[in-house]
Image (spheres, rainbow, N blue to C red):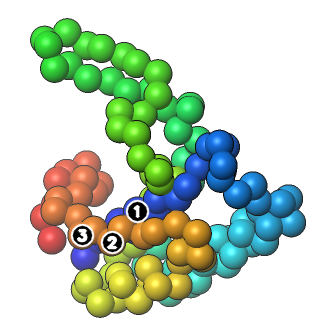
Amino acid sequence: MRYSLIFHAPDPREEGSPQPSPEAMAEMQKLMSDYADALYSAGVFIAAEMLEPTEQTTTVTRRTGSVVIEDGPFAASKESLAGVFIIDVENRDAALAWAEKFPGTNYGTIEVRAAAISYIDGRWVQP
């Protein structure tokens, strides 16, 4: 079953946020690479994306019948979506076990969410 490990983290560019040193950033990049390698070696890795900062976000809506494109995120919050890892594991407990190992939990949170339906090999598939 596919699970998304959705990573939310404080934006270090936000006023008053602690600024990581270049050494801390390099260490986190290594930890993330090691984590992705472990997922891959275990045969559960599907994909991972670390996202640009929220100020690079563009939102698209069609609430009034016409498309509206705006700069910035739709909702303001202390933490923003920073990345997503997609894994394919046996069950929720296995997904939680991988989420517990995620290095970003030192400063952010991981939301574990099962896929309700996935688009795989040109068709929609339900678990």
Write down the residue under mark 3.
114
Q: Quadrant of residue 50?
A: bottom right
Q: Secondary structure at mark 3?
A: strand
Residue at 52% across, 66% down = 108
Please provide percent x and percent y for residue 59. Answer: 38, 27
Taking the image as shown, residue 99 lies to the left or right of residue 107, namely left
Q: Is 45 above or below relative to 14?
A: below
Badges 1 and 2: C-beta atoms under 8 Å apart?
yes
Q: Is 10 above or below relative to 62?
A: below
Residue at 16% across, 20% down = 63
Front residue of 14/22: it is 14
Taking the image as shown, residue 74 lies to the left or right of residue 19, namely left
Q: Which quarter shows the C terminus?
A: bottom left
Q: Earlier in the sequence, mark 3 or mark 1?
A: 1
Badges 3 and 2: C-beta atoms under 8 Å apart?
yes
* Residue 112: mark in rendering: 2
In three-dimensional space, the C-alpha distance between marks 3 and 2, rounded to whole angstroms, equals 7 Å
What amino acid is labelled 3 in the image? Ala
Front residue of 69/20: it is 20
Please provide percent x and percent y for residue 81. Answer: 45, 51
* Residue 73: mark in rendering: none
What amino acid is labelled 1 in the image? Ile
Q: Which quarter shows the N terminus?
A: bottom left
Please provide percent x and percent y for residue 53. Answer: 58, 41
Q: Secondary structure at mark 2?
A: strand
Please tell me whether mark 3 or mark 1 is closer to you in this view. Answer: 1
In three-dimensional space, the C-alpha distance between marks 1 and 2, rounded to whole angstroms, equals 6 Å
Please provide percent x and percent y for residue 92. Answer: 26, 84
Write down the residue under mark 1.
6
Taking the image as shown, residue 90 lies to the left or right of residue 19, namely left
